[in-house]
Structures are given as C-alpha cells and as structure tokens.
Amino acid sequence: MGKRRVKATICNEAGEVELAVLEGTMGPEALDIQQLYPDHGLLAFDPGFRSTASCKSAITFIDGEAGVLLYRGYPIEELAEKSNFIEVAHLLMLGELPSESEYEDFWGSIRRHSLLHEQVLRFYDGFRRDAHPMAIMVGVVGALSAFYHDAMDMFDGEHRLQAAIRLVAKMPTIAAASYTYSIGRPIRYPRNDLDYAPNFLQMLFGVPSEEYEVNPTLARAMDLILLLHADHEQNASTSTVRMAASSGANPFACIAAGIASLWGPAHGGANEAVLRMLMEIGKIEKISEVIARAKDKDDPFRLMGFGHRVYRNFDPRSRVLQKMAKEVLDHLGIDDPLLEVAVKLEEIAVHDEYFIERKLYPNVDFYSGILLRAMGLPMTMFTAIFALARTVGWVSHWLELQGDSHGIDRPRQLYVGKTLRHYPGKGKKQQR
C-alpha cells in the first residue's frame, strides 16, 4: 500500500499556489512551508511544535503508534541485546556500527579524554554541598567552553569530532564528581582499564581507602540504561541543543543548554518524579485508592511514569528496562517496600481497561527510576545519568547540524498583545 498523498494549496488574489510535500525515508510526509511567510505573508501556528518538523535528520526514527525506535535504522531492542553503549555512540555520532579496529580507535579516543582539567575540579568547591547534581553539571559543562574554545576551528570536521568525543569522555567524570562532592567524598579519577559503564560506577561508589570491585550485573544494567537513553529524536533538550548550535555557539555551551532543558520534571526529571510518587503511595494497600484518583478527572493527581508524549503504544525502551529491572532485583535480592509498590502498581495498571483504552502504559521513566534506586543511586542522580546518556545524542545532532545551511533558528509568534498606542500627555523629561 502506497503513502497517502497530500495536496495543499493557498488561495490568494493571484490565484492558487500549491505547497510542496516532502517525503522522508520513513514516517509521515511534511508540508514545505518555508516560503509561507516570505511569499504569502502567513505564519504557521503550532504551539509546542506538535506538528512541525524543525529539521531534517538521519539519526533517530520514532513511530509512536507502532512503538518503534530506531537508531540509524537499527531497532533499539536489537541494539540493547547485542550491542553496548560505546558501539551505539559510534553509530549515532558517525553513522555506522564500527568495525573491530574502528571500535578500538573510537574507544581509545574517549579513554584518553576522560580526565578533567585540575582547575575544573576546583569549580566544585564553589557549589553548596546540597546543590542538585544537574545544577553542577550545567555550570561545569558550560565552563569547559573557557578551556577549549580557542583550540577549536568550527569549520574543521576533525576539530568538531574531537569536541564531541571530549564531551562523551568527560561527562561520566563530571556526573560522578557532582555526586561524590555532594556527599563529602573525594572525587575519584577515571580508570582507563575499565569500560565506560564500569568506570562510571567506580567513580560513583568507590572510595580511595579500598579497591572497588564492579558488579558485572550492575555494570550491564548501567550500560543498558545509557544505551536506551542515548537519543530520542527532536525532544525538548535536543531541540534546545540544535537551536543553540544554529547560532554557532561553542559546543560545550550548547550541551550545557541541553542539560538545563533536560532538568525539567516533564522531561529528564520524570523518573525522579516517579520515585517521589511511589514514596507518596508508600504501601501496596494504597494502590487501589491511587488508581481511583488517577481516573478521577476532577482530581489533580497524576500517575507518573505512565503514557508518553510520542508513544501511543508500549515504549520499546520500557520493555527492555522492565526485564533488566527484574533481573537486577533478583540478583541483588533487595527487599524494598517502595520497589514492591512499583511492581504491584505496574501489574494492576497494565491490566486495567481504563489505562489500556487510553494507551497509558508504563514508560521508560517508570522502570529506570526503579532500576536506579535498586542500584543504590539517590533520586538526585537520576536525571544526571539521563544527561550523561543523552550527551551522545546531543553531540550527534550537533555534528549533523554543522552540515545544515539553513542558518540560525528563528521561530516567529502570533502576536496577541496591544495594538499601536502612544505615550499619553507630554511625558516626563529626564532629570539632569
């Protein structure tokens, strides 16, 4: 069955003008409205950009109705089963899965850039001990602009790739240090003998007075969390990075802007909100009351971790994390009442007709919050780990944008304020 053909026309004094329809390789067609204002004096009104394709991209594809997520054409489920985060980083950033030698070169480049400048480490002392890790990450990542700005030629592809690799390499060190600083523990240096996820875990949980032995099950779980969160098309934080990058801003500043956007509870902070909701529920006996409140349209209570802005089917990432969460819980033998509440809530909701009809399935934030808690991470670190993972997607979009010639992003508005008016009377002369 072929694609549904769309024909759009504008009728004006000069007659009818047909607008072009653009086709991608997958997904819906797009109406080309680039000349809508220059040629016809009209703006498209689309609050929240729900029906707007802001750019062309070859990185990630989502079919929300079918519950499909592809990285460069590869289903997320296959990558979760067969790949790892560094291989996926190469795929997203450079377009293809690496050969064995390409993988070693790529991973070697990341290892070589994982250290932070000693002066950067001193920045942490300027933050309060109770500062949110995301606040620290926004500040530290933005500050990296001052360390590498003069050494970069933005017109040189190798320099751009080097900046992207630096960000992917340093983000675990930055994120882990934001946590250890907050609990008064010494900042640990990265270890080049460990893979990406195990290295991050030893920087999070290790102490100088003893050797830290990485649990392989937890290392695989962390790698999977990073892989599944690496990119997700034109979400709020990625769009923020692309918009900042369109001005030619320093890449470290662009990624800092992305971190700030991700911090919001409706975006990256959603998994933290899930755990807060579970804490509010407290015990299994209250779940039926909570379900009833969620169904009551007059009750402002929201069941966090269910449904998704894009997916109208099961989020494919959540299926993978659901399985991993149960594996980690079984492996650790954790007896946590909060996790019992989460498991029971999921069990009830996925079989309730109200949620099934509205396609309110547990999403990736629901399971990632459970998993990260089981791994011993505080809620304040949930979004920081999301930012660590999404850095790969952000730099991939930043690299892709460099070949785009549309110039600086400049959305317009539908003005609804006062019409022209004049200052009343003679006015007040400036005092001299």
Image (cartoon, rainbow, N blue to C red):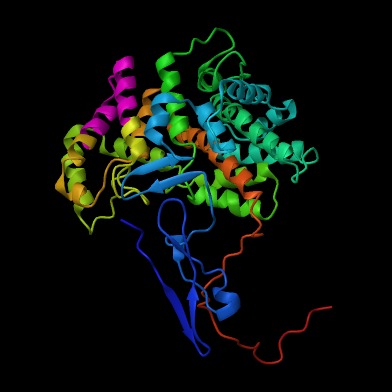
Residue 134's place in the image compared with 243, above or below, is: above
The residue lying furthest to the top in this view is 210
Q: Is residue 46 left or right of residue 354?
A: right
Q: Nearer the viewer, residue 80 or 245?
A: 80
Q: Is any atom of residue 130 visible in this view?
A: no
Q: Is residue 335 magenta?
A: yes
Residue 296 drawn in magenta: no
Q: Is residue 24 above or below residue 393?
A: below
In the shown orientation, is residue 1 left or right of residue 228?
left
Coordinates of residue 148 in the picture (x, y in percent): 75, 37
What is the total number of numbered labels drawn onto the structure image? 0
Q: Nearer the viewer, residue 43 or 269?
A: 43
Quarter containing the C terminus: bottom right
Identify the residue at horizontal 50%, vertical 45% (top origin): 262
Residue visible at 65% across and 50% down in the picture: 403
Q: Quadrant of residue 75?
A: top left
For the stretch drawn in magenta, what is the main secondary structure? Answer: helix
Q: Could one spot residue 215 in this view of the protein?
A: yes
Residue that lies at the very extreme toward the bottom in this rendered image:
425
What stretch of residues is rendered in magenta? 322-345
Along the viewing direction, whichever of 77 and 5 lies nearer the viewer? 5
What is the quadrant of the N terminus in the image?
Answer: bottom left
Q: In the figure, is residue 380 to the left or right of 127? A: left
347 to the left or right of 243? left
User: Residue 311 in the image: x percent, y percent?
Assistant: 34, 48
Q: Position of residue 256 (x, y in %)?
A: 61, 43
